[in-house]
Amino acid sequence: MCLTETLDEMVQNGTLSPELAIQVLVQFDKSMTEALENQVKSKVTLRGHLHTYRFCDNVWTFILQDALFKYDDNQENIGRVKIVACDSKLLSQ
């Protein structure tokens, strides 16, 4: 979220072109996807109350309240969680 907000601010200030900001986000998403596929071995279960969901331009956005993350032998309660998801195949186009 911080990266997106920073890039948005830079585009609004004219420091960065919108095209370059999109390229940065795409590269970041590719890097994160690769790291998650190759380095993460844990399984996480997520439960919560679905507050809002949206599908726009092939991007899903979910907002959960009172979310519970379970992983390994741990669990953590989070008050509000925003999940943004898209098809990784669309990023390479």
Image (spheres, rainbow, N blue to C red):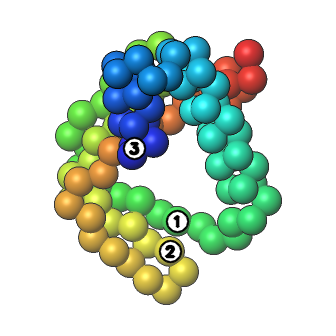
Q: Nearer the viewer, residue 13 or 27?
A: 13
Q: Are marks 1 and 2 in contact (CB under 8 Å)?
A: yes
Q: Residue at x 70, y 39 (%)?
A: 30
Circle 2 or circle 3, nearest the eye: 3
Label number found at residue 44: 1
Q: Amino acid at mark 1?
A: Val
**Which numbered circle lies on residue 78?**
none
**Badges 3 and 1: C-beta atoms under 8 Å apart?**
no
CA distance for labels 3 and 1? 20 Å
Question: Is residue 83 visible to us here?
Answer: no
Instruction: Please state the horizontal and vertical placement of residue 91, each as a whole percent of the image.
Output: 67, 25
Q: Which residue is mark 3?
A: 1
What x and y, as percent, mark residue 11? 42, 21
Dot 2 or dot 3: first in sequence order is 3
Which residue does the numbered mark 2 point to in the structure image? Answer: 71
**Which of 61 and 25 lies nearest the eye of the viewer?**
25
